[in-house]
Amino acid sequence: MNRTLSFAALALCAAASLVSAQRPLKVYISVDMEGITGVASADQLSPASFEYGQARKWMTAEVNAAIQGARDAGATEFVISDSHGNGESLLIDDLPTTVPITVVRSFPRPLGMMEGIDSSFAAVIFIGYHAATTSTTGVRAHTMSSALLTRIALNGTPQSEAGINAAIAAHFGVPVVMITGDDAIVGETKQRLGNIEGVAVKHAIGFHSAATMLPAVAQGLIRDHAKIAVGRRAEMKPYVMTKPVTVDVSFKNYRPVELLGYLTSVQRVDAHTARLVGRDMIEVSKFLEFVTSYDPTMTP
C-alpha cells in the first residue's frame, strides 16, 4: 500500500465532504390559496371575503410545515413565492426567522409564480395549488385567470399553473418534488411530472365545494412529505419543454385575441386563441404575464 497516496485520497475525500456540507441546499416554494386546506369557495379568497383572514393563517401554516419538512431533509435556504391574488396573502411575520427566507410578493413579475427561481435551487415545492381551467372536477379550477382564459397549452398540451411553473423551473434545471392541493391537481400533476410527492388535502366535490381534512392534520402530512420529497430530489426530473416553446392562450372574449393578432410575433389561430412561439420558457412566461396583466388604464 502506498501510504502517501492513501493519506492524499483521504484528505481529498474530507475536503469534498466539507465543501458539500457547506454548500447551501436551496428550496423554492410557490404557494397559492385555492388548494389550501379548508378553502372551497370565493368566501375565503379575497380581502373582502368573510373567511379570508382565516385562509391566510391556514396558508401560512402550510408553508411553515413545508419549510420544516424540507429543513428536516437538510434544506438551508428558501425563497417563498406569495402567489395568490395580489401576491400579498402570506402572513410573513409568522414565517420562521431561524433559517434564511426571502419572500417574493405582489404582481406583476416576469416569471409570475416562479419569480426568483434560478439554477442554484435543488428543488421546488408547490403548496395550495389547484386544477387547470380545463378540469371538470377541480375546486376553483382555472389557469392564471378565471375571468379571462379558458385554456393555456404548451407545445400543444393543455396546462395547469403547476405545469407552466414546472416548465419554468425546468428552464433552470430544477425539478418539482412535491405538490399539495385537492385530489384533482395532485393526480393531474403526478401524471404529468412523474412520481413526485403529493398531498391531497381535500377531495373535490365541485368547482365551489370540497370535502376537506382538518388544517392541523394536513399540516402534519405536508411536513412529513416535504421531508421525503427533498430527500428524494435526485430521483425527480425537470419538466423540460422542447424549444422553441409554442404557447396557445384561449380567451373567453374575442377582442383580446383580435388585438394580440396585430402583433407580428403573435398568430391568431382561431376566434378565441392567440399563439406565440417563444425562444424558451422565460419568453413564454413574460408573454403570459403581459396578456393576463396589461391594462392601458393602469396607474401609476
Image (tube, helix red, strand yellow):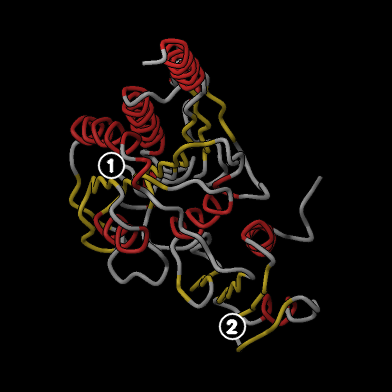
Q: Is residue 123 above or below residue 266?
A: above
Q: Residue 176 or 286: which is nearer the viewer?
A: 176
Give the structural element (helix, strand or loop) at label 2.
loop
Amino acid carrying mark 2 in the image = His
Residue visible at 42% across and 43% down in the picture: 49
Mark 1 to mark 2 CA distance (whole Å): 34 Å
Say which label, 1 or 2, has the lower sequence index.
Answer: 1
Q: Quadrant of the N terminus?
A: top left
The x, y position of residue 116, in whole percent, is 61, 39
The x, y position of residue 65, in whole percent, is 32, 28
Give the residue at the far front of this rendering.
1
Q: Residue 193 or 137: which is nearer the viewer?
A: 193
Residue visible at 31% across and 27% down in the picture: 69
Q: Residue 243 or 255: which is nearer the viewer?
A: 243
**Whether residue 30 can be seen here:** yes
Q: Is residue 255 above or below residue 48?
A: below
Amino acid carrying mark 1 in the image = Thr
Q: Which image quadrant for residue 137? A: bottom left
Residue at the spot of label 2: 272
- Mark 2 Cα shell of 10 Å, populated few (<14), some (14-19), many (≥20): some
Residue visible at 58% across and 48% down in the picture: 172
Left of 259 or right of it: where is 44? left
Give the residue at the far bottom of this rendering.
270
Residue at the spot of label 1: 37
Left of 64 or right of it: where is 218? left
Residue visible at 30% across and 63% down in the picture: 191
The x, y position of residue 159, in whole percent, is 45, 67
